[in-house]
Image: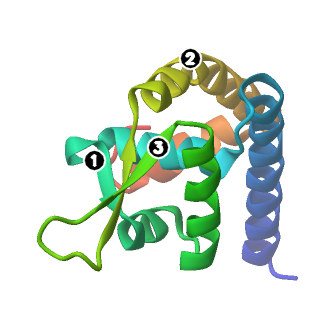
Amino acid sequence: MSARGDLWLRLVQSVATVEAELGRILQDQYGIGLSDYRALEALERAPKSELRMQELAAHLQLNQSSVSRMVERLERSGLTIRDLCPDDKRGVYTVLTDKGRAHLTAARPDYEKALEAAIAKHGGGDALAAAFASAGQAA
């Protein structure tokens, strides 16, 4: 394997390990998965805290079926609701509820702390800083 290929494999393995650790913490402490957390974050950042299902799927890089199942779980937990698009009755929005916002706010400090610890543990901090610095962005 080339040096570049070896570096890529190490990066992928590090990301997978960090994501698994984050997922365990979120599931154990808040009863949500990592994709659920990311969906709640995306909704919080969206105008009116709502996104069309297709937009949420694109944001999370998940297929429509996976997002539909996830939104159904989030809705059963009261973290989101579905709403019809007023301009196009075929369009369905996923909307963050007050309970969902509170759940995200409660989980965020533990997520951030776990993320920092996992990145440090797996040596990713320097790589992230270098990658974003070379791209002209602050890490």
Mark 2 or mark 1, earlier in chain? 1
What amino acid is at disc 2? Ala
The residue labelled by disc 2 is 106
Residue at the disc numbered 1: 46
- Residue 78 has which mark? none
Quick one: label 1, few (<14), some, or many (20+) residues within 10 Å?
some
User: CB under 8 Å between callouts 2 and 1?
Assistant: no
Question: What residue did someone put label 3 on?
Answer: 80
Look at label 3 and name its amino acid. Answer: Thr
* C-beta proximity under 8 Å, tags 2 and 3: no
Name the image colouring.
rainbow
Task: Classify residue 129 as left or right of residue 31.
Answer: left
Task: Kindly identify the residue that appears in the image at 36 percent across and 68 percent down.
Answer: 55
Residue 118's x, y, as percent? Answer: 76, 32
Q: Residue 130: in sight, yes or no? A: no
Q: Amino acid at mark 1?
A: Ala
Q: Measured from the top left, where is residue 51 in percent x and y?
A: 32, 58
